[in-house]
Image (cartoon, grey):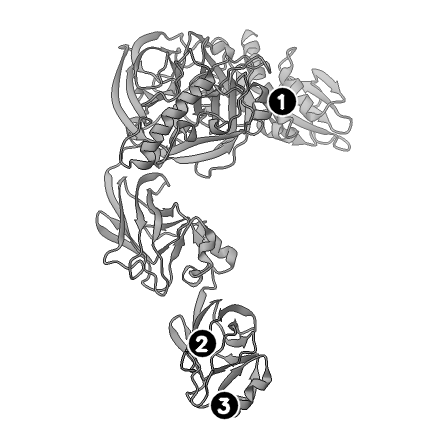
Amino acid sequence: MRLFRTKRSRLIGLLLSSLAGAALTGAANAQTEYFTSTPNAAISGHNNKSLEDVSALECMRACINERGFKCVSFDYNKNEMKCDLSDKRATDVGGLKTDYPGNPYDHYALKDIIEQQTSTPRGDSNLPPSLGWSTPTPNIVASVSAISGPESAVINTSLRGFVDKYGEGVHIGDHVQGMTMTASGRIVLSISRQLTGLNGCGGVLAYSNVYNPATDNDLTWTFYCSGLDAHPSALQASGDVVAVGSSPGISFFHLPPRGEITRLSHLDLDGASTSIGFTYNPADRRYYTINAAGSTTPVARPATVCRSLPNVSLFDSSTQIDAGGCRSMTIYASGQGTNLIAQSNGSLYVVSAFSTDDFWPDEDRTSSEIEKAANYSVTCADDGFISLFKSGERTPYEDVVVLTKVDFDAGRATVIKNVDAGRTQSVQTCVHDRPAFRFGGGVVTLKNQETYAFWSGRFLTPLPVARLFEDQKVGLNNDSFEFAIQRLPATSSPERNYSVGIDCQVDDISNEGTSGTITATFYDKTGMQIGTGSVSDIADGLLGCARVRDIEIAAKTRGDAETVKISTNSSDAFMVDQIKLYREGELVRTYGANNDKGWCLSTEASDGNVNWKYAADGVCVDWHMWSYSGQSIPNLPYDLAKARLGTTNTPSVRYRFDIQCDITGVENEGTTSKLTAIMYDANGREIGRGSHQKDTNNFVGNCTDIDFEVITTGKASKYRIMTDGSDAALLDQIYLYENGKEVDVEGVKNKSGWCLSTEESDAHGNWQGFTHLDTCRPYWDFDL
């Protein structure tokens, strides 16, 4: 019976808050998560307790909260809104009864998975991550060696509702202290707060819905502050259990894939901690923690590493994380992120994320937050000047990672590797403007065994726009938050040499070069970024983008590349005529042809709609991707844009008109009116038009040839040439070219031509006998 009560209490703590959250979205979510329902069925008899005037969701809560007996199922009378709670399952009583008149009952049974989550782990890696198990990493040295800020992706999100909830208590000194991600993919932030008495909360944990780095889905956030210290510090998730450091010690929380966070107070460890780590080691089936006074910059500190007994459950109220003993050792411990990582072979490592400069003067206890902000602004402006104008010089704010191997039995920690991670963005004037290890970050492993590095921004409110009152509260707040993430390789890969050659000379257009930066980013077959290179200021010469050699962008990669993404950071558009993919100096594949078509790259989509409309098929995007193996790549922005324009299966066609208007014996055949050519398809539908307007009479009274283009969607079958004015024009011969090839010639060089004018009388007088059909018309039609 004692075992039953223990399991019962664990069920309540695990499920109650999640069911409360499920009430917001209806009983259906709760059923799916915790109960199995069988419509039009019930257990006959065996009712331990009856409830009236209740919903199915209220019966679920009642079953979970029941302490008088072990409730495992209930029958809900949907007609009378009643339910009968039972300590029996259908399998205990020979099955369900399904022939009640009118089928008033639905049967609900508590899922067995809840019992599995509270049972003792037995080494099965397929058990749910809610057990607190973190997935082991095959080669943490290889993963950490690949951490690179420039190769991370910066993610912008919004902690919607934070300011509304805590606005009166938001202070300029508040900031993110730590960041982690559960094995299911829920991001957790610890936020330190200065003004804790205004709304009854100390520090805050902000946690998201499940985030998928591969799709960068939208994030929604929930906030938790019950019983938290005012200054929660670093944190780490093992499975779906999160350890949070603070002044009193380490607190533990359970955050399932869906639902709300719950406290696991029986696991709490005493002892002030600004640097903590937490993981499960499947080799000896123990949980490990690390506790230290962390540092902002790389400094070795005294630390305590503890472990549990083997084969314990975190949901058992008798479990103690340090019951297996503790060891003291010196470790490079970071207050922003000190992550314990278990390798597949059982080796235990500490990954500590540091910045090489303190930035914010936290240790200046004599200054107010406003004075600190002023001091910081001066410092970061100086550092930003180096970044912006002194290319190649290092700035103080670089991110570094220290990898340490822990031998628990020997009580020894050995530094294995130091990694210079650089910065997450190339130009940053202040640390507040970028995600950085200064405030939170480290390494996480998800349940699919993918490993990620991540960097956190400082806080929601940028200082330059903050309006400060005497009490230093922020008067102009927003919920914006920024972090960076990078997928890391699971194993070590040989270094490769990859490059791309770009021919940017597209026939019949000009200014194909760019003043922006063109970047080549290489990815392996799993979609992980493995290398990058770039080139800037591809200037146009006298012949446009023509040059003796292709533009080359090279990179050393970690392993073999499957795809390469070419991107621009500029609205100064760039054209790619041909792209050649190289591996170890050998040409692997060529895309495009040396012709008048290409890919337009620009941050301004409209750049594909003017002079380059034909060459770019009306499409300009800021990046495009090509495959080394020749495989098609779905959902590329370029292809999607073409599909929206309806040009995927109907390529653009360029028509060029060369109209000769010098007729023997006639003067002033030219015109100042606008001439327009309209192209039609076989069904008479207009598919494009182009115009020409300038004085075509030369200084001796003869006509200068009229030359202009029309870009169409598809091939034309007929065309019309029209005028908008009464300044008559005589057309002697019309030459029409389709994509550079002559496809039509109208007229011959003689003493007669087509007269274009809105005044029919222009065909008489001096032009009498020189106009076709002795008339002038506003337009003439021709067949192809």
User: CA–CA distance between discs 2 and 3?
Assistant: 19 Å
What residue lies at 51% left-to-right and 88% top-to-bottom?
771
Q: Which residue is mark 3?
A: 770
Position of 783 with respect to 451 (left or right) is right
Q: Can residue 721 be seen here?
A: yes
The earlier-in-sequence mark between 1 and 2 is 1
Q: Say what amino acid the circle numbered 3 marks.
A: Phe
Task: Estimate the spatial distance between the alpha carbons at disc 1 and disc 2, rounded to whole Å.
Answer: 80 Å
* Disc marking residue 696: 2
For disc 1, the marked residue is 20
- Residue mark closest to the camera, 1 vs 2: 2
Q: Is residue 328 above or below residue 430?
A: above
> Could you classify mark 2 by the number of other residues whose Cα lies within 10 Å: few (under 14), some (14-19), or many (20 or more)?
many
Q: Amino acid at mark 2?
A: Thr
Vertical position of residue 265 compared to residue 654: above or below: above
- Determine the secondary structure under disc 2: loop
Q: In x, y percent, where is residue 132?
A: 45, 20
Q: Position of residue 655 (x, y in %)?
A: 44, 71
